[in-house]
Image: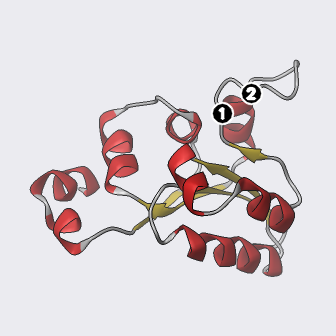
């Protein structure tokens, strides 16, 4: 099912970030081509090098860190993506996705992704049940 599929894992800043590394490994083991974009907050929990070593690809963090002059990174990554997995999905990224806020590499790329999205919420129970979060998830 994932053999040769292009999966981008969007990693946001919560303690569950450490589980995203194993998720990347499992997607690769299933035959997927995996790239990772992460927020600066996520990089406070797990370094980008971890995801680079696992995925064998550059890790996208900075919207303005353009590696290739022929393409715009967040658009190129969005177009490459066949499945977007947001894990862990913090209340912050869920709110940004729900309200069209694009102010970092992850949220900007997600605005341009047309592929299916799998959102994996991970936060404190009170945050998850907060009416604003409930509304944003809906």
Can residue 35 be seen in this snapshot?
yes
| Residue linked to disc 1 | 62
Identify which residue is drawn at 71% across, 70% down.
24
Question: Residue 44's spot in the image, x, y percent?
Answer: 56, 55
Tell whether 100 sits left or right of 118: left
Circle 2 crowding by C-alpha within 10 Å: few under 14, some 14–19, many from 20: few
Closer-to-camera residue (7/127): 127
Identify which residue is drawn at 59% across, 49% down.
115
Instruction: Point out the image quarter for the C terminus.
Output: bottom left
Instruction: Point out the image quarter for the N terminus.
Output: bottom right
Q: Secondary structure at mark 2?
A: loop
Tell whether 56 sits left or right of 125: right
Question: Residue 100's spot in the image, x, y percent?
Answer: 37, 32
| Residue linked to disc 2 | 65
Q: Quadrant of residue 69?
A: top right
Whether label 1 touches label 2, CB < 8 Å:
yes
Can residue 119 be seen in this snapshot?
no
Identify which residue is drawn at 78% across, 80% down.
30
Scheme by which the image is coloured: secondary structure
In three-dimensional space, the C-alpha distance between marks 1 and 2, rounded to whole angstroms, equals 5 Å
The residue at the far top in this view is 69
Identify which residue is drawn at 75% across, 33% down.
76
Closer-to-camera residue (117/26): 26
Q: Secondary structure at mark 1?
A: loop
Closer-to-camera residue (128/45): 45
Question: Is 99 placed above or below 93 here?
Answer: above
Question: Is 99 placed above or below 81 here?
Answer: above
The residue at the far front in this view is 44
């Amino acid at each position: 099912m994932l053999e040769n599929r292009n999966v981008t894992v969007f990693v946001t800043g919560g303690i569950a970030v450490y589980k995203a590394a194993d998720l990347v490994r499992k997607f690769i083991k299933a035959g997927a081509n995996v790239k990772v974009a992460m927020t600066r907050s996520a990089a406070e929990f797990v370094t980008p090098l971890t995801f680079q070593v696992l995925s064998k690809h550059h890790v996208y963090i900075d919207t303005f860190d353009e590696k290739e002059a022929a393409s715009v990174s967040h658009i190129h990554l969005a177009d490459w993506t066949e499945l977007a997995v947001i894990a862990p999905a913090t209340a912050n990224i869920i709110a940004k996705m729900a309200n069209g806020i694009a102010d970092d590499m992850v949220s900007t790329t997600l605005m341009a992704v047309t592929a299916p999205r799998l959102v994996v919420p991970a936060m404190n129970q009170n945050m998850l049940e907060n009416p604003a979060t409930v509304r944003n998830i809906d």
